[in-house]
Image: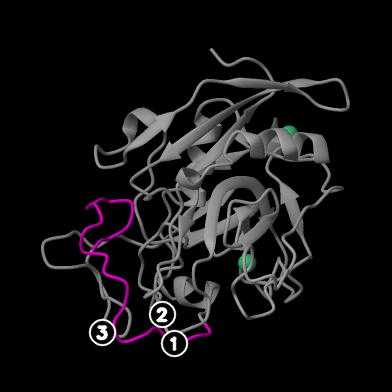
């Protein structure tokens, strides 16, 4: 199972890595989305410098969290928030619900099991979700056929699994986009080509994809920008359902800082869950 190797090394790397890994390219509004009601957690240092406020670092009374490199499958992430090795280790303010396993027989005849994890507290990053899936003996779901994609989407086809950017989030036109549950695709590429380098944590070939399309219909896609996914210009390296204005079975690529309130000038949004796939019935 080398292809699913996941380690959380103890080594601490230079903090500069965090700022070179990802850059933001638009300006936050003055009246930024108020995060004061969000739960306090080590998952991201709540109360840190809010966008536009200048400064950085942890809020008073909170421990500085070192930046570290974390290897997840084929990818390396630089994170500045605490990670937990399994569900039992999660702090109490991570509020989640693990839903009953559902089985599905894919077109190759293999039946796998799928577990939706609803994270109501919206404070589990893609990296953390991948670690939790691995700790259970599974992986973030790989959707390798239209049939599997349709089945898994049917498990999360509800607004409660999709986080929506609030209207007052930013003066940027990226409004009311919904970020859906995380899936197991990760992009490993040095290029700016958003389509390049996608891999499944399962190790399966990336032969099927279902990226969201720009619809300009005013209903499903109210974002006036060209919003065809993946649109990360090589900087949105994890993925999940969504990135349109209603729950959709198509995919968006996301910043790995989604669900992480870090020092990068603005949060990249939140996330309300993820899907674990098991090749065999877990214990
Ligand atoms: Ca799969
Ligand atoms: Ca995207």
Distance (Cα) linking label 1 and label 2: 8 Å
Instruction: In this rendered view, identify the residue nearer to me: 248 or 93.
Output: 248
Decide: marks 1, 2 in contact (CB < 8 A)? yes
Q: Disc 3 versus disc 2: distance between alpha carbons?
A: 14 Å
Image location (x, y in percent) of residue 256 = 52, 60
Q: Can residue 185 be seen in this view?
A: yes
Q: Nearest to the eye among marks 1 and 2: give it.
A: 2
Q: Is residue 1 above or below residue 161?
A: above
| Residue positioned 80% across, 52% down in the render | 209
178 displayed left or right of 15: right
Q: Is residue 253 above or below residue 233?
A: above
Q: Name the residue under label 2.
A: 170
Q: How far apart are marks 3 and 1 (CA)?
A: 12 Å
Point 26% across, 75% down: residue: 49
Task: Report the mark closest to the observer, 3 or 1.
Answer: 1
Closer to us: 94 or 171: 171
Task: Report which quarter residue 56 is drawn in.
Answer: bottom left
Categorize mark 1 by other alpha carbons within 10 Å: few (<14), some (14-19), many (20+): few
Q: Earlier in the sequence, mark 3 or mark 2?
A: 3
Q: Is mark 2 on a helix, strand or loop?
A: loop
> Which residue has dot 1 on it?
27
Q: Nearer the viewer, mark 3 or mark 2?
A: 2
Sequence-first tag of 1 and 2 = 1
Residue 53 image label:
3
**Is 120 left or right of 35, judged from the image as shown?**
right
Asked if the magenta segment contains residue 158, the reply would be no
Percent x, y for residue 40? 22, 53
| Residue 145 visible in rendering | no
Specify start and end residues of the magenta stretch as a single range: 25-46
Q: Where residue 230 appears, x then y in whole percent?
A: 71, 66
Give the structural element (helix, strand or loop) at label 1.
loop
């Amino acid at each position: 199972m080398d292809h699913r190797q996941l380690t959380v090394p103890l080594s601490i790397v230079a903090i500069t890595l965090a700022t070179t890994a990802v850059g933001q390219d638009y300006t936050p509004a003055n009246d930024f989305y108020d995060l004061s009601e969000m739960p306090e957690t080590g998952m991201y240092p709540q109360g840190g410098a809010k966008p536009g406020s200048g400064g950085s670092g942890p809020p008073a009374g909170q421990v500085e969290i070192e930046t570290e490199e974390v290897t997840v499958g084929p990818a390396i992430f630089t994170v500045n928030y605490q990670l937990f090795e399994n569900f039992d280790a999660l702090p109490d303010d991570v509020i989640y619900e693990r839903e009953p396993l559902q089985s599905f027989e894919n077109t190759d005849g293999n039946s796998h099991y799928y577990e939706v994890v609803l994270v109501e507290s919206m404070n589990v990053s893609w990296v953390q979700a991948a670690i939790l899936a691995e700790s259970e003996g599974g992986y973030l779901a790989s959707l390798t056929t239209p049939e599997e994609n349709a089945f898994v989407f049917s498990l999360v086809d509800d607004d409660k699994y999709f986080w929506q950017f609030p209207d007052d989030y930013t003066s940027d036109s990226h409004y009311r986009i919904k970020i859906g549950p995380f899936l197991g695709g990760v992009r490993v590429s040095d290029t700016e080509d958003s389509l390049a380098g996608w891999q499944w944590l399962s190790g399966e070939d990336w032969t099927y994809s279902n990226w969201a399309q720009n619809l300009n219909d005013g209903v499903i896609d109210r974002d006036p920008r060209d919003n065809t996914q993946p649109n990360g210009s090589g900087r949105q390296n994890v993925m999940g359902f969504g990135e349109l204005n209603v729950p959709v079975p198509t995919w968006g690529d996301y910043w790995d800082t989604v669900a992480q309130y870090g020092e990068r000038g603005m949060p990249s949004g939140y996330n309300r869950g993820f899907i674990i796939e098991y090749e065999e019935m877990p214990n």
